[in-house]
Image (cartoon, rainbow, N blue to C red):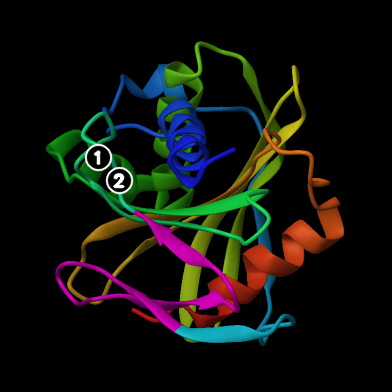
Amino acid sequence: MTKKILYSLILSYVLFFTGCIVVKEKDEIIHKETEVAYESSPKASVKMSATYVVTPAGDMVATLPDGWFFIEPSGSLSSEIFAIAANPDYTMCAVFTHIKRTSELEQLVAQEGLIGLSRVCYAERNGKATGTINFVDNYQILDMKPQKFGYFSYIRQEDNTLGCSATFASNINEYYEYSLVTMGFTLNDVPERKEFDEIFMSILSTLKY
């Protein structure tokens, strides 16, 4: 496949799993899963590059793994997506999104913190995927001192596409989501969950806000 086709396929995965955040009524987005606190101060377990992701506002920076490269977002994607990166095998992509603040979202975050922000992100993602993705495990708080993140994971059953997301509020109180998603459109093997988690946490360990 040509790079143009590969890039188009990557963007199709991003389009399927992401979208603009629209806050729904609270009883539509609250799930029964129990919040689980998780504390860790990890370091990257894979080789990282000197390539950085920076928000337009300059209030967050993160490092990409060695060999990863940026994909230019297309016009069909949400304007809130400011960075997309893929690994050399085209089996994983990382997506960085700014979350628009609304009065409804502010109320929910005031009540539930990052768990509430994560609930909204998952509800929007599941709605965009027309209910074809399943929630995995519980919402968690990743306390990676001094950074703190909301966390959740999900899977598309038809092809076992796996995704994990971390939500956070920057030091100027802007909301963001970092997501990692597997991609299965090439002949390359999709990473096992252990390797996937190592990549996700390695990028997250470099994220500073």
- The residue lying at 27 percent from left, 38 percent from top is 74
Check disc 2 and give the amino acid type: Pro
Residue 2 falls inside the magenta stretch:
no
- The residue lying at 40 percent from left, 27 percent from top is 124
Hey, which residue is sitting farthest front in the picture?
Answer: 2
Q: In front of the other: label 2 or label 1? A: 2
Query: Along the polypeptide, which appears first: circle 2 or circle 1?
Result: 2
Please name whichever residue, 29 or 168, is drawn nearer the observer in this view of the structure: 168
Q: Which residue is mark 1?
A: 105
Q: Residues within 10 Å of mark 2 (few under 14, many from 20)?
A: many
Asked whether residue 165 appears in the rendered view, the answer is no
Asked whether residue 22 appears in the rendered view, the answer is yes
The location of residue 191, given as percent across then percent down, is: 80, 52
- The residue lying at 54 percent from left, 68 percent from top is 68
Please name whichever residue, 85 or 170, is drawn nearer the observer in this view of the structure: 85
Q: Residues within 10 Å of mark 1 (few under 14, many from 20)?
A: many
Q: Which residue is mark 2?
A: 73
Check disc 1 and give the amino acid type: Leu
The quarter of the rendered structure image containing the N terminus is top right
**How many numbered discs?**
2
Residue 144 is left or right of residue 162, and the answer is: left
Question: Compared to 133, does 49 lie above or below?
Answer: below
Residue 154 is left or right of residue 177, and the answer is: right
Report, in whole angstroms, how far the alpha carbon at label 2 lies from the one at label 1.
25 Å
- The residue lying at 24 percent from left, 68 percent from top is 55
The quarter of the rendered structure image containing the C terminus is bottom left
The location of residue 173, given as percent across then percent down, is: 21, 66
Question: Compared to 47, does 77 lie above or below?
Answer: above
- Write the start and end of the magenta stretch as one range: 51-71
The location of residue 112, given as percent across then percent down, is: 41, 48
Question: Compared to 202, does 179 lie above or below?
Answer: above
> Looking at the rendering, which quadrant does residue 60 occupy?
bottom left
